Amino acid sequence: MAFTITCEEIAGHPEFRRLDSIAGIAVDLRYATPDNFVGRDLYSPLDCAWLHRHAAAALERVVAWLAERRPDCKVLVLDALRPQRVQEQLWLALQGTELLGYIADPERGSIHSFGMALDLTLLDAQGRELDMGTGFDDLSERSHPALEAELLARGELTAQHIANRRLLRDAMFQAGWVGINSEWWHFDCGDRLLVRRDYIRVL
């Protein structure tokens, strides 16, 4: 059964938590700025600084793991809740391009629209993003975790790039997040099929 609410209703809903309720993270929602692959602010005036409470708790486990093992590093959230209406805008923006495969078909729904996915990276002690070999939203093969060994062999990624990505994955995986093969920055909180079946989609 599908449950839905609008983004405007989320503030009063007990299943969602605002990102600023999570200690120890930095936030720079790139789709609320022109600094993304579409080149425009897709979120304003919507407030998209939210996660489902289960994802928020899993992110807190990431913060705790880093604090214990790599206190010099900090999570930078680049995208969290992405309402269905924004997902539809992204889908339309990429029609007719080779990049369409990077965007979940709105018919099926992005896990971001349930507040159960994150795009993120890590900051160093000086607040600089760790070098992952590409920036966020670099929709090229160099962003694909599945190709890292090959990219290293070709000299397109360095051992340091891969070590930085592995640190991010280690922090996320131990807290129950699941990565994907095509974007080093994207993680789902649990199984996509179960999320689409059991969680609330934000329109």
Image (spheres, grey):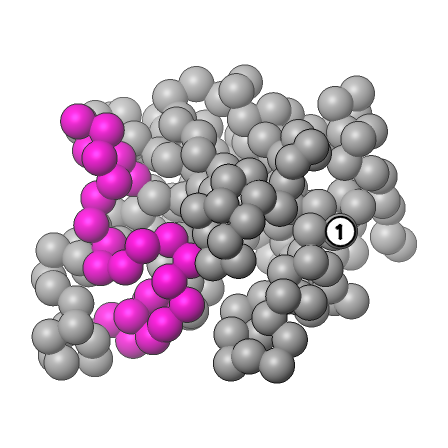
Quadrant in the picture for residue 157: bottom left
Question: 107 and 86: which one is in front?
Answer: 86
Location of residue 170 in the rendering, given as x and y in whole percent from the top left corner: 30, 48
Residue kind at label 1, given as amino acid type: Arg
The residue beneath circle 1 is: 85
Where in the figure is residue 115, as x and y percent of width and height?
64, 42
Instruction: State the residue in front, 90 or 168.
Output: 90
User: Can you say whether 110 is above or below 102 in the image?
Assistant: above
**Residue 164 at x, y = what percent?**
21, 50
Label tally:
1
Query: What residue is shown at x 89% (from left), y 54% (from top)?
Result: 1
- For the residue pair 79 and 195, the one nearer the viewer reads as 79
Q: Residues within 10 Å of mark 1 (few under 14, many from 20)?
A: some
Magenta includes 84?
no
**Residue at horizontal 12 percent and vertical 79 percent from the top:** 153
* Above or below 127: residue 193: below
Left or right, residue 42 beside residue 20? right
137 magenta-colored: yes
**Left/right of residue 74 with respect to residue 124 in the rendered view:** right
Answer with the quarter of the image where residue 108 lies: bottom right
The magenta stretch is 122-148
Is residue 161 found left or right of 9 in the rendered image? Answer: left
Tag 1, which secondary structure? helix
Q: Main secondary structure of the magenta part?
A: loop
Q: Can residue 162 be seen?
A: yes
Residue that appears at 13% across and 80% down: 154
| Residue 176 in sight | no
Horizontal arrangement in the rendering, residue 6 relative to residue 11 (left or right):
right
Residue drawn 79% across the image and 20% down it? 12
